[in-house]
Image (cartoon, rainbow, N blue to C red):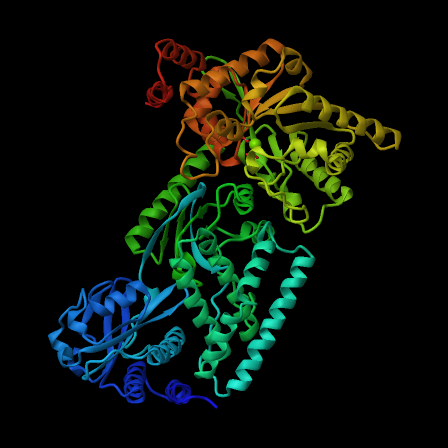
Amino acid sequence: MPNRGESDSRKLLGRLRDTLAAPGDGQARLDSIAHHIADSMGTQVCSIYLFRDPQTLELCATEGLRPESVHKTRLRLGEGLVGRVARTGRPLNTANAPAEPGFRFMPETGEEVFPSFLGVPIQRVGEKLGVVVVQSRAAREFTEDEIYGLEVVAMVLAEMAELGAFVGNDAQPSTHRFPAMIRGLAGQEGAAEGQVWLHEPRVVVTNPVGDDPDKERARLTEAMAMLRRSLDEMLSTNAMPKGEGAEVLETYRMFAQSRSWLRRMMDDIERGLSAEAAVEKEQLQTRARLEASPDPYLRDRLHDLDDLAHRLLRILTGQGRDTGAEMPPNPVLVARNIGPAELLDYGRRLRGVVLEEGSVGSHAAIVARALSIPLVIHATRITAEALNGDTILVDGDTGIVHLRPEESVAAAFRDKIAMQAAAQSRYADLRTLPATALCGCRVELHMNAGLMGDLPSLEGSGAEGVGLFRTELQFLTRTRVPRRDELAAMYRRVLDNAHGKPVVFRTLDIGSDKVLPYMKPQDEPNPAMGWRAIRVGLDKRGVLQMQLQALIRAAAGRELQVMFPFIAEESEFTQARAMLMHQLEREGAMGHALPSGIKVGAMLETPSLAFASPAFFRACDFVSIGGNDLKQFFFAADRENERVRRRYDTLSTPFVALLAQIVDRCTQAGVPLSFCGEDAGRPAEAATFAALGLRRLSMRPASVGPVKALIRRIDLCALRGLIDAARDEGACNLRPVVTEYLARASA
Ligand code: PEP
Ligand code: MG
């Protein structure tokens, strides 16, 4: 038998639903809703405030306050009691409103005669929509039951607002109408303009009110069971990206099997909400609790909770990811996060990617880099702010995103894109020319790649070859280990598309920082320094052996260049090379055609290798400095940690001294040396490396043109002289001397 609170609540919700269904404009609906709420709750006042813009609340309807104040009375976010409710996202209940801290006297409303006040936020997940307030003449606090009742009503109002029920006659100001600037972090350089394409479109709840609680309860129970089944299935097939499976399962256990979560949703249904509105309401309230928790583990569960609620909502509403909407012509993907395989599916159609989470070293970032798509990460609230089709500007250099920009902002941005395009076309003239400096020193410029699709840019960029082909992506984007013949076919296509230009394949650099979906995750305290790259290859030989066989078969009759990542000591290189030689013998014995020549290199990514014996350097056919890793280990500064990753300068004297020493050691051993970290594509760094004697630089394709133009107008011997002099004089950092020289050379 439902109690009175429940049956009143259901009656009120029924009336709200009828209001939604009845013809009429937004203002008429809001007026009638305010009337019904006051009537049902037995209060003299009910007022509905909605956001006019992200900072301003406007009184949009009232029962009981002066009608003239509607659309006149406004409050800033955080101002007055209403502003406080909106800011905190929590109800405020008081018997004496004027005595509350922050109370703002609004004489135009005539509210001074109603001292008791209950305000409840109107919100959806990640989105503040407004505040609903009831007030009464009698000075009393509202009961728990009344607060609960108003929260249920607020949920229905939020869903109605989302459906556009209050639009018309200027009743509801739209929050998704205003320009927004979001400051995130640069993930991949470049600038793009396009239209938002949400990876996970927002679920629209069309029926926030449930007629029949039994039916809604059954729907929720069934949806929970389906959710459990689909999660079990996903976990058993390992179809989730790294780590996510375990975390979602854990969160699932925490919430889905938590009796209190279920019970609260059932209570909401009893009060008249539909199953989906109940899921949203509890998601909101559990979020608020988790956000306020001092326990970082619980706060980290927020996204898992969202993920779960989202899955439940999709089951309940039948709205999948595929909503039938058509992708706009210049899509910029907006997502909380995205796995590498999904990002690859979108591929080069995308103009840019903006993520709410992510990290520079994440798999998605690796793919975005391979696709050369501008990427911004840590763009707070972007998934709540953006709507499909909104105009969006992505600046991957600064990490700034403009949503629905003003025309002046868009125009300035377009100028920037046009300037970059013009610069690239100027570099196109240099495509076939060598990077020869004024002093006659010749520098080879190669490009880094990681996808088949990169190779067309080999021609366009003017690169002389592929100095680093990262082989992780083919492994990361599958749910099972790729087969040898698949890999061989892929590598063969890479070599075919290179049209005889050299390609250096780096064997798998995978480890606990880049866990493959089908690899058992190793819980390591410090994965970047853990069991990764060649360490895995030598300890668990199967995958590396298979990869080497695939490379040998792909290169049949052509030169094969292989380099092993993360060699920290000589013996690792010796063993890896022996493995390659053994596979060559084996392939030959099996009658497979062999490569016409083999070059085997080591990546120098740990400072230790710079101090290896002369015999090590002599044993290498080439050495390539993996500057990204070398720098992080030299300075002990995690390359993925935003706090420290830019803290130390590549051109600081100690790091340059290390590079100079490596150049000397390679020169003495007569072994070619290259540099293939991100720094090779930056002008001052590239010029310095070349001046130190590095004669091969490998970088992202878009950097080849600018670096070539730069090398061709400078004198590397002169620059070397300036660097040496500055070092002799005890300079701590060589950037000033290098940039000053480059500025003079460009003048
Ligand atoms: C490097 O460490 O510089 C490098 C090229 O390898 P990755 O960035 O793939 O670790
Ligand atoms: Mg590396």
Compared to 163, does 405 lie above or below? above
Query: Residue 449: x percent and y percent?
Result: 59, 37
The residue lying toward the viewer, choosing from 443 and 621, is 621
Res. 502 in view:
no
The residue lying toward the viewer, choosing from 512 and 654, is 512
| Image position of 59 (left or right of 448) | left
Query: Residue 368: x percent and y percent?
Result: 52, 45
Compared to 492, does 353 lie above or below? below
Q: Residue at x 39, y 63 (%)?
A: 288
Res. 521 in view:
yes
| Image position of 462 (left or right of 522) | left
Image quarter where ligand 2 lies: top right
Compared to 500, does 417 lie above or below? below
Numbered-mark total? 0
Q: In which quarter of the image is the C terminus?
A: top left
The residue lying toward the viewer, choosing from 443 and 676, is 676
Query: Looking at the rendering, which quadrant does residue 69 occupy?
Result: bottom left
Query: Looking at the rendering, which quadrant does residue 342 occupy?
Result: bottom right
| Image position of 261 (left or right of 672) | left
Q: Residue at x 28, y 82 (%)?
A: 27
Query: Residue 474: x percent and y percent?
Result: 66, 44
